[in-house]
Image: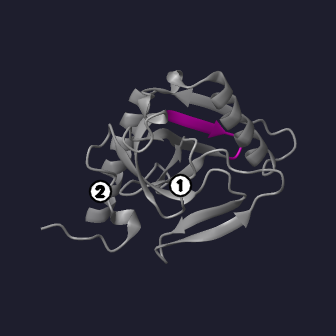
Amino acid sequence: MYLIPRKLKDLGAGTRVPNYIFVIIEVSAGSDVEYIYDEDLDLIVVNKVLRPPLRYSFNRGFIPGTRDVNGELLRSIVLSEHSFEPGSLVESKPLGVLNIQTKDLSIEEVVSVPHERIDPVYGRYKDINDLSKDLIHKITDFINRYYGEQRSVGDEIMINWRTSEYAKEKILESVKRASLERRS
């Protein structure tokens, strides 16, 4: 018997973790409105409107059934030429991790692509190193502009890219962390 989870965050990270993961989309590619998942309400809510001309150049969401080192749901960028609606579940393949650091901030987000049956073009990628320099530049440019608005003058943004193996380790750690949290 399969029980439907009561909350999105309790859905589970996927059926073939860590090679494939579930990502619940919070923000669609091309959106200038940022949404976030509110765990208490179990809803995706408007967080803010981005300042023009800034728009998300990728889909962004969270991996249910996970917890990062800060106790938050592990986030994922989902790369595709297509825009996925907030609240939709996209089975994705992890390619790597995007690490963003400033003086006051350290964020790691899994970089993923939809499963091959969903997006045969992006689904063929296996690792962050398979992505074109143009796509990496597009993501980096967005991150610099997005976090550039939030940082102090002189605070440098450092961006590092990690491989799919690192991403899979990160996902397994976050699933274990969430499992331990549920037991306590």
Q: Is residue 102 visible?
A: no
Is residue 155 highlighted in magenta?
A: no
Provide residue 9's location: percent of width, then percent of height. Answer: 40, 64
What residue type is disc 2 on? Leu
Provide residue 111's location: percent of width, then percent of height. Answer: 51, 38
Residue toward you, 93 or 184 = 93
Q: Which residues are magenta?
A: 96-104
**Tag of residue 177:** none
Q: Residue at x 46, y 48 (%)?
A: 69
Q: Is residue 164 left or right of residue 29?
A: left
In this rendering, is residue 38 above or below 175?
below
Q: Residue at x 80, y 39 (%)?
A: 155
Q: Residue at x 78, y 50 (%)?
A: 54
Q: CA distance from mark 1 to mark 2?
A: 31 Å
Q: Residue under label 1, please give it.
A: 84
State the SS at label 2: helix
Provide residue 80's location: percent of width, then percent of height. Answer: 54, 41
Provide residue 112's location: percent of width, then percent of height. Answer: 47, 39
Q: According to the image, what is the colour scheme of the structure?
A: one colour
Residue toward you, 97 or 117 = 117
Q: Is residue 16 left or right of residue 84?
A: left
**Which of the 4 image quadrants contains residue 148?**
top right
Q: Is residue 87 visible?
A: yes
What residue type is disc 1 on? Phe
In this rendering, is residue 110 above or below 14?
above
**Number of residues whose C-alpha sits closer than 10 Å to that of mark 2, classed few (under 14), some (14–19) or many (20 or more):** few
Quadrant position of the C terminus in the picture: bottom left
Q: Residue under label 2, please give it.
A: 180
Quadrant position of the N terminus in the picture: bottom left
